């Protein structure tokens, strides 16, 4: 049984929703534009290779000359959208071709498709721009190019998170070795004849006392597969984000917010903490504050490898209901409930064949959430079980 208290994550979810670089545009979008183009352009020929990331078939362009004005026009050829000479390092990707009068026009866009429109073909030359960094491939397939957990390899070596054009640094990931990174996709960047793969990841950054996700591209060589085992200066690490029991115990030992956990562990002196049992306790029996509409119904984890599991639900509920109380008050309540359930200190001393499952977030302020009942996160769980 898990207590479920909903928290609103409107601001945080909105930030995560602004991931236009991770989505594959729909074919229907180009088709609907084509009906509009017919009023201004003739002999239309649609090209969806760029939209569908078929980079081996993509037609790329660059400016013949970046010294004179080259205008990009809107769909009806009634308004100048951009002067392409202001973007001398861009490669432009073809989405369609057509004619206007006796002139050939090309519908092009930059890589993130933030600038799209029609350009007279005479201003363009086929091929990638020789200046700057150019995206020559974009891949989503897992596990090679997307998905999975990653972490920064070194806290001593710069690991810059770049924008798509590789001209603006959004973060230095060497300062975030305690963060798990999730790849959305990967791109291959060409620069000075050399091609390098980059992963698109996000990292939580605190600015003006507010935490937000910042996304960008980091070179594959600077990150490694797997979750981080560095939890320094991390207030909250969720139960499924630990890599081993040793990793979990190190976090419990070092974190200032795990004093309650350490005190409860002392009540079970001969029952070693086990990560798998702790994940079972947290996900299957814990009482917690839920976030972002999560109802907790699909959080249960497998109990394979464990037997004779005893969940102390009343204790987890007591801790949650009294989450604002002092640790001394909580420990006194836990001892009383254990005694009432027949688990006196004498009996607990004999639990040598069991593993201890324990996971607590002890009413900690959650920086990345704007709108919560009290601006804090609480999660309590306690159970024991034998390994098969």
Image: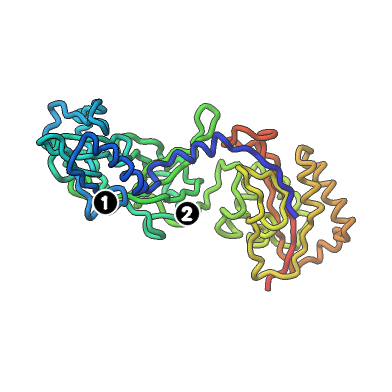
Decide which of 72, 2 is in the foreground and name it. 72
Residue appearing at x 13%, y 26% in the figure: 68
Please identify the residue farthest to the bottom as the structure is shown: 388
Q: Where is residue 169 in the image (x, y as percent from the top left)?
A: 35, 36
Query: Which quadrant does the C terminus fall into?
Result: bottom right
User: Closer to the camera: disc 1 or disc 2?
Assistant: 1
Please, what secondary structure does the residue beneath circle 2 have? strand
Can you name the residue that lies furthest to the front here? 39
Q: Badge 1: few (under 14), some or many (20 or more) residues near its Cα, within 10 Å? A: some
Mark 2 — residue?
A: 149
Nearest to the observer: residue 371 or residue 358 = 371
* SS class, disc 1: loop
Quick check: 274 left or right of 143?
A: right
- Image quadrant where one finds the N terminus: bottom right
State how many labels appear.
Answer: 2
Is residue 196 among what the camera can see? no
Q: Please say if the residues under marks 1 and 2 sit with CB atoms less than 8 Å apart.
A: no
In this view, 300 is above or below 136: below
Q: In which quarter of the image is residue 19?
A: top left
- Label 1 and label 2: CA atoms lie apart by 30 Å
From the top left corner, tell me how far across and down residue 204 is, in percent: 50, 39
Q: Eyeballing the image, is 303 above or below 66?
A: below
Residue 355 has which mark?
none
Measured from the top left, where is residue 77 in percent x and y?
22, 30
Q: Residue at x 51, y 33 (%)?
A: 206
**Mark 1 or mark 2, earlier in chain:** 1
Q: Is residue 96 left or right of residue 311?
A: left
Q: Is residue 44 visible?
A: yes
x and y percent of residue 54 in the render? 27, 54
138 vs 40, nearest the viewer: 40
Name the mark on residue 49: 1
């Amino acid at each position: 049984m898990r207590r479920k208290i909903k928290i609103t994550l409107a601001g945080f979810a909105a930030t995560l929703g602004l991931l236009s670089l991770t989505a594959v545009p729909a074919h229907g979008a180009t088709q609907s534009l084509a009906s509009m183009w017919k009023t201004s352009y003739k002999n239309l020929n649609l090209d969806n290779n760029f939209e569908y990331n078929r980079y081996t078939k993509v037609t790329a362009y660059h400016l013949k000359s970046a010294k004179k004005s080259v205008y990009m026009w809107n769909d009806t050829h009634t308004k100048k959208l951009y002067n392409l000479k202001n973007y001398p390092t861009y490669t432009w990707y073809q989405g369609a071709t057509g004619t206007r009068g006796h002139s050939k026009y090309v519908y092009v866009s930059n890589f993130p498709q933030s600038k799209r429109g029609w350009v007279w073909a005479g201003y363009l030359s086929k091929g990638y721009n020789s200046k700057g960094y150019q995206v020559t491939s974009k891949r989503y397939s897992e596990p090679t190019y997307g998905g999975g957990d990653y972490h920064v390899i070194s806290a001593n070596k710069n690991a810059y998170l770049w924008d798509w054009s590789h001209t603006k640094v959004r973060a230095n990931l060497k300062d975030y070795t305690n963060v798990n990174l999730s790849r959305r996709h990967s791109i291959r960047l060409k620069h000075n004849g050399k091609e390098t793969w980059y992963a698109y990841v996000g990292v939580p950054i605190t600015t003006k006392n507010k935490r937000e996700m910042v996304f960008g591209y980091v070179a594959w060589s600077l990150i490694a597969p797997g979750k981080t085992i560095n939890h320094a200066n991390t207030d909250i690490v969720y139960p499924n984000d630990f890599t081993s029991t040793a990793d979990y115990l190190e976090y419990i030992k070092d974190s200032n917010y795990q004093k309650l956990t350490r005190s409860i562990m002392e009540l079970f002196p001969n029952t070693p903490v086990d990560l798998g049992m702790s994940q079972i306790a947290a996900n299957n029996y814990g009482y917690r504050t839920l976030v972002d509409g999560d109802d907790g119904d699909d959080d249960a984890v497998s109990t394979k490898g464990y037997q004779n599991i005893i969940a102390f639900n009343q204790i987890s509920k007591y801790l949650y209901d009294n989450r604002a109380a002092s640790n001394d008050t909580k420990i006194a309540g836990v001892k009383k409930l254990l005694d009432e359930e027949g688990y006196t200190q004498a009996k607990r001393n004999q639990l040598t064949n069991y593993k201890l499952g324990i996971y607590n977030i002890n009413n900690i302020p959650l920086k990345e959430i704007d709108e919560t009942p009290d601006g804090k996160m609480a999660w309590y769980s306690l159970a024991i079980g034998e390994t098969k």
